[in-house]
């Protein structure tokens, strides 16, 4: 797997980065485009080879150059201050603000083509700039605008999927679900499944990205008209550009509103790579998930109150000022209101920024727009007064580095003025805009020392919630002490190789529930897999551990009694009710949609019932965030097997659904809802779910869930985003590919193949440029203990199975060959090398579905950590991203 990942990751990094040339150090990137070629695709095809060489040179000459140190504060502080991402399309300077390919917002307003002289820049021009690094001509922008309109067709099933949701669902839930439904048409997924060479990955990614950018305004407008305008849809106008078309599909035709939308989309499109939505899109795409899955996951991060919901909160707060003290309020009265807000423990939304140290230039350009178009608007005047009143107060408090207004301080007031008053919808506008920046970039390519965690549970209390309530205060104090006493302790250095290599080797996340040791494998709260098999309660003596027991262990750090596991199992069954609209949402998708697309769409539909979202909107105090997170998490864990089983029965068993059995535990119930009743298969499912549940926090799915949740997105949104990362071929699809490869061996050379013939087949596979799936791991340096426990299961239950014997022979044949190649650190089998063969033996032969099983399992680990994220008050994750130019300049100085 390491070999597989290392080669594919390198190509992926190249194919992403090559489309993100720098600007400042090359005359080429600063010139205004003069080429007569109007085709963006051909422009990229020309640029890619030279940028591939540039990245290759940067890695080979400067890979070991240090960029800074990692401290405990950074790990506990959401990676803030940590340089960890390559993001070529934009760079955020703390003093100057955002630069798109080195151009500031005023420079973009001056240089990018507009719809009319002196008008705002067209978003299509910014897309061209982000992809090519060149300022386009008006003719090139017009050609791109025409191409986007030609791609702006949305299949009927997308509307049906949205319509299946309650109309009261949050606009972002409806929007992201619509994007998930679009995934059915992904050209990248089709090309990958056909075996496209990695050097060509960028081409179907380009196709998906341009289609996605073209389609999202239509989907977003549909959501708006459905929710607020009685479902009266307005079609696209072929005579209008991207921003203007979006405005008119929403129902606004004032020429100034069309200009505002052009400006809005342009300035919100990209903001380097460290913010939650951009980082999520990049992270999910790094597993080779297609642009639709990557962008849908990014939207779930954007939906978080600490990220994209801020502009909504600004307008609502400003309206609360008007309601309480009036529109024409004096500055002294305004000061009193601001102090009242701050003294109540709340914040004044729209002020401050995690990176910027001066007024956000996106605020400034919107202020200039307002001065030009609505200078007498009372709310605009109020915002102007806040600009003078708030910063001195925040400076006086001394708790912020930047007291100046950010982009959100103005956008809501402008939209409100032109009639778009539905503040709850504003984040969807942000999402449409962000599609440009994310798609442009996506193209480029311990617990052991604590006795507490080791003790066996002896309490008679069967209630998991009360257990957590007891544990949380002491763990909060533990975290506080760690930060205050050791925050500046260095954990290692960041090198250029780490930034270019997907953060590999970089210590950056706090993940309490499990720790992955390179030599020993995964430890759940310090317990190894063999120890969990020995200590956790089972359904029968000597049986496999019950997943409910692992959930208890991950949440409390204690080994539960059988009575506690039974009580938790009963509680999960009581929560296992799935609303009808979830099934309708899944049924709206084509039955041919990938099982993971259907599963993740079902999870998105569950989001409507989020207790966390309801509590947040009612103003719950942050010290209580963990409680509704706990409610959502346990409900989600209880519901996902039902949703997953529904997808399986819909796709493969003529839609004949099997209800839950109240007498069975979690793993066994999942197996029987799929349609399997062999006692050994029930045992296998218990083992499968347990060992796949958690694998520390650095893998794509776990990190995505944590990242999205750091913006205070609820567990449903966070887990749905995680599933989109798990769906990537470099992550959760591996067990599917192992079984398919093993079956290809059988088809070509037979089941009872000699080891010599098997060696020849392995060499043939490698020499063709492919990999042998199921071997190697990004962290482990020995045989994966998850492989070992499955091998022991097979030896016990199916020792004579021909495919098991083949897997056993591969265990002997493949590692020496990979060692001979000398390109991998770990040639030993991982968890995926065995699971497919076991499932296949018991009749679950549909390999394309296997990742859904992985997803159900992973709900336990991700949700357990999310509860602790909220209980410990872990912050918004926000690492620093840099461009290749920044790295090159840094290395020259170094």
Image: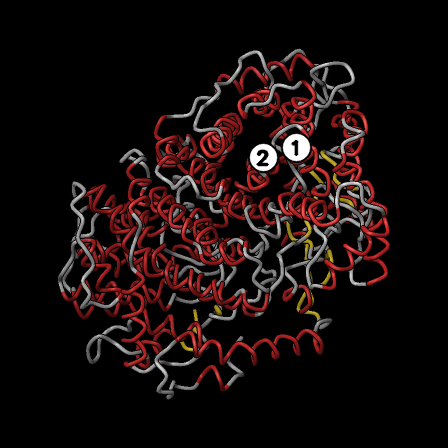
The local crowd at label 2, few if under 14, some if 14 to 19, many if 20 or more residues have their Cα within 10 Å, is: many
- The answer to whether residue 491 is above or below residue 101 is below
Residue 818 percent location from the top left of the image: 41, 55
Decide if residue 829 is in sight here. no
Which residue corresponds to the image point at 63% horizontal and 65% vertical from the top-left? 75
Give the tally of numbered discs: 2
Q: Secondary structure at mark 2?
A: helix
Q: Nearer the viewer, residue 120 or 810?
A: 120
Q: Nearer the viewer, residue 70 or 109?
A: 109
Q: Read off the residue under disc 1.
A: 415
Residues at discs 1 and 2 in contact (Cβ within 8 Å): yes
The local crowd at label 1, few if under 14, some if 14 to 19, many if 20 or more residues have their Cα within 10 Å, is: some
Which residue corresponds to the image point at 66% horizontal and 24% vertical from the top-left? 257
Query: Would residue 723 appear left or right of 401 to someone viewing this image?
Result: left
- The answer to whether residue 568 is above or below residue 19 is below
Whichever of callouts 1 and 2 sits on the residue coming sooner in the sequence is 1
Decide if residue 310 is in sight here. yes
Distance, label 1 to label 2, CA atoms, is 10 Å
Residue 127 percent location from the top left of the image: 63, 27
Occupied quadrant, residue 83: bottom right
- The answer to whether residue 512 is above or below residue 128 is below
- Tell me, for residue 429, which label it has, or none: 2
Which residue corresponds to the image point at 39% horizontal and 51% vertical from the top-left? 732
Residue 846 percent location from the top left of the image: 23, 46
Q: Quadrant of the N terminus?
A: bottom left
Which residue corresponds to the image point at 66% horizontal and 36% vertical from the top-left? 268
Q: Secondary structure at mark 1?
A: helix
- The answer to whether residue 18 is above or below residue 495 is above
| Colour setting | secondary structure
Give the label, 1 or 2, closer to the camera. Answer: 1
- Tell me, for residue 441, which label it has, or none: none
């Amino acid at each position: 797997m390491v070999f597989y990942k290392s080669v594919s990751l390198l190509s992926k990094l190249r194919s992403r980065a090559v489309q993100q040339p720098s600007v400042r150090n090359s005359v080429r990137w600063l010139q205004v485009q003069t080429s007569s070629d109007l085709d963006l695709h051909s422009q990229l095809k020309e640029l890619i080879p030279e940028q591939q060489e540039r990245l290759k040179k940067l890695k080979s000459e400067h890979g070991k150059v240090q960029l800074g140190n990692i401290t405990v504060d950074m790990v506990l502080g959401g990676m803030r201050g940590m340089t960890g991402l390559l993001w070529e399309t934009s760079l955020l300077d703390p003093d100057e603000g955002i630069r798109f390919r080195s151009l500031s917002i005023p420079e973009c307003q001056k240089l990018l083509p507009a719809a009319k002289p002196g008008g705002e820049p067209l978003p299509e021009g910014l897309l061209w700039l982000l992809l090519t690094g060149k300022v386009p001509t008006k003719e090139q922008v017009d050609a791109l605008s025409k191409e986007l309109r030609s791609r702006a067709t949305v299949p009927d099933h997308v509307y049906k999927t949205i319509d299946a949701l309650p109309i009261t669902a949050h606009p972002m839930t409806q929007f992201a679900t619509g994007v998930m439904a679009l995934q059915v048409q992904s050209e990248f997924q089709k090309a990958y499944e056909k075996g496209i060479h990695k050097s060509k990955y960028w081409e179907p990614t380009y196709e998906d990205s341009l289609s996605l950018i073209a389609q999202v305004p239509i989907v977003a407008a549909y959501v708006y008209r459905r929710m607020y305008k009685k479902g009266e849809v307005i079609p696209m106008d072929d005579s209008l550009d991207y921003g203007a078309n979006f405005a008119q599909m929403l129902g606004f035709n004032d020429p100034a509103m069309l200009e505002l939308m052009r400006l809005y989309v342009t300035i919100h499109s990209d903001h380097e790579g460290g913010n939650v939505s951009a980082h999520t899109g990049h992270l999910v795409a790094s597993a080779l998930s297609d642009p639709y899955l990557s962008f849908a996951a990014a939207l779930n991060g954007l939906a978080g109150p600490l990220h994209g919901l801020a502009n909504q909160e600004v307008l609502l707060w400003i309206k609360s000022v008007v309601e309480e003290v009036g529109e024409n309020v004096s500055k002294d009265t305004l000061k009193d209101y601001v102090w009242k807000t701050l003294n109540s423990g709340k914040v004044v939304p729209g002020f401050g920024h995690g990176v910027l140290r001066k007024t956000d230039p996106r605020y400034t350009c919107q202020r200039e727009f307002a001065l030009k178009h609505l200078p007498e608007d009372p709310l605009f005047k109020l915002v102007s007064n806040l600009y003078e009143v708030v910063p001195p107060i925040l400076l006086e408090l001394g708790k912020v580095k930047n007291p100046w207004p950010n982009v959100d301080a103005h956008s809501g007031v402008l939209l409100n003025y032109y009639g778009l008053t539905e503040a709850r919808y504003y984040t969807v506008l942000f999402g449409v805009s962000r599609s440009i920046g994310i798609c442009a970039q996506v193209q480029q390519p311990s617990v052991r020392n604590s006795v507490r965690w080791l003790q066996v549970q002896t309490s008679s209390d069967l209630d998991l919630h009360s257990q957590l309530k007891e544990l949380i205060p002491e763990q909060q104090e533990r975290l506080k002490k760690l930060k205050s006493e050791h925050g500046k302790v260095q954990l290692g250095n960041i090198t250029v190789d780490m930034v270019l290599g997907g953060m590999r080797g970089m210590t950056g996340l706090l993940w309490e529930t499990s720790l992955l040791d390179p030599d020993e494998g995964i430890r759940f709260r310090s317990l190894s897999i063999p120890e969990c098999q020995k200590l956790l309660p089972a359904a029968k003596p000597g049986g496999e551990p019950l997943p409910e027991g692992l959930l208890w262990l991950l949440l409390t750090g204690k080994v539960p009694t059988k009575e506690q596991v039974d009580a938790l199992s009963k509680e999960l069954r009581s929560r296992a009710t799935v609303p009808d609209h979830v099934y309708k949402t899944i049924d709206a998708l084509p039955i041919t949609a990938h099982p993971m697309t259907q599963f993740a769409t079902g999870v998105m539909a569950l989001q409507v019932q989020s207790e966390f979202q309801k509590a947040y909107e009612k103003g719950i105090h942050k010290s209580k965030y963990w409680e509704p997170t706990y409610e959502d998490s346990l409900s989600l864990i209880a519901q996902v097997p039902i949703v997953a089983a529904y997808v399986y029965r819909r796709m493969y068993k003529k839609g004949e659904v099997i209800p839950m059995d109240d007498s069975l535990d979690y793993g066994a119930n999942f197996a029987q809802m799929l349609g399997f009743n062999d006692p050994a298969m029930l045992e296998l499912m218990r083992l499968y779910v347990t060992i796949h549940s958690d694998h520390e926090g650095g893998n794509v799915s776990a990190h995505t869930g944590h990242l999205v949740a750091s913006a205070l997105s609820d567990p449903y949104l966070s887990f749905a985003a995680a599933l989109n990362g798990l769906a990537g071929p470099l992550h959760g699809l591996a067990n599917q590919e192992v079984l398919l490869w093993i079956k290809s061996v059988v088809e070509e050379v037979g089941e009872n193949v000699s080891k010599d013939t098997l060696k020849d087949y392995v060499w043939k596979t490698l020499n063709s440029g492919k990999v042998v799936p199921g071997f190697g791991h990004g962290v482990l340096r020995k045989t994966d203990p998850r492989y070992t426990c499955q091998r022991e299961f097979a030896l016990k239950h199916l020792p004579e199975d021909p495919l098991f014997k083949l897997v056993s022979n591969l265990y002997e044949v493949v590692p020496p060959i990979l060692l001979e190649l000398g390109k991998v650190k770990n040639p030993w089998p991982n968890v995926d090398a065995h699971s497919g063969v076991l499932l296949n033996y018991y009749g679950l032969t549909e390999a394309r579905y296997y990742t859904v099983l992985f997803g159900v399992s992973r709900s336990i680990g991700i949700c357990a950590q999310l509860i602790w994220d909220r209980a410990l008050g872990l912050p918004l994750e926000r690492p620093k991203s840099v461009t290749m130019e920044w790295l090159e300049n840094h290395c020259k100085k170094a």
